[in-house]
Amino acid sequence: MGQPLPYTSFPRKELHMENSSVPTVLIADDYDDVRKILKTWLEQHEYRVIEATSGKEAVEIAERELPDLILMDLAMPEIDGYGAAFLIRTHAKLRDVRIIGISAYGELGIDAQLKIDPKAVGFNDYLPKPFSPEKLLGLVDRYLSKNKSASVG
């Protein structure tokens, strides 16, 4: 009997989309409490959640796991959310992944460009903190249902 094929020989996205109806969401935020809250909300609505604590880790995990959607904090160590989104978009398999920028700096004007045109800086959308579970889940559901219908037809 031959050697089993290594897991890495299979593209993660194809396995996930064909064998599971549970979309994967990557939460990239350097605050443990924020990740914990977002993870709880998303898992209660039957999303698979993976986590990153920095922009650098977000890029590495996205390359390995090929998530269906990324919630990207803007202010993180090593590489900020803008840089991580840019690097993620350079990978062919991640070029179309949905990325939602999240930030608590909206009132300070730091993320003004995201309010005007999130796509200009590599994000599909923007959600200023704090936000309600309903607002987050509505946005996530909207993008993941678009993603599913785009992959079907």
Image (cartoon, rainbow, N blue to C red):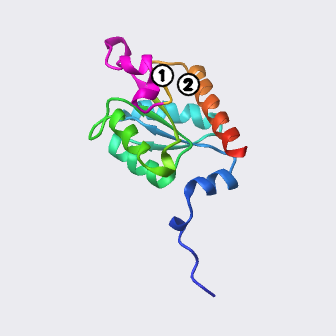
Whether 39 is drawn above or below 137: the answer is below
What residue would you read off at disc 1? 127
The mark closer to the camera, 2 or 1, is 1
Question: Residue 11, percent across and down?
Answer: 56, 59
Left or right position of 149 against 49: right
Question: Along the line of sight, which residue is nearer the eye, 25 or 101?
Answer: 101
Front residue of 45/93: it is 93
Outermost residue toward the right in this view: 153
Q: Quadrant of the N terminus?
A: bottom right
Query: Which residues make up the magenta segment?
Result: 102-123
Vertical placement of residue 112 versus 36, above or below: above
- On whether residue 121 falls in the magenta region, the answer is yes
Q: Nearer the viewer, residue 146 or 55?
A: 146
Answer above or below: position of 55 versus 129: below
Q: Which amino acid is tagged 1? A: Leu
* Residue hosting label 2: 136
Question: Along the horizontal axis of the image, is 84 left or right of 64?
Answer: left
How far across and how far down the image is residue 121, in percent?
A: 39, 29
Rendered location of residue 153, percent (x, y): 73, 43
Element carrying mark 2 = helix
Type of amino acid at the residue the image marks with label 2: Leu
Magenta span includes 3: no
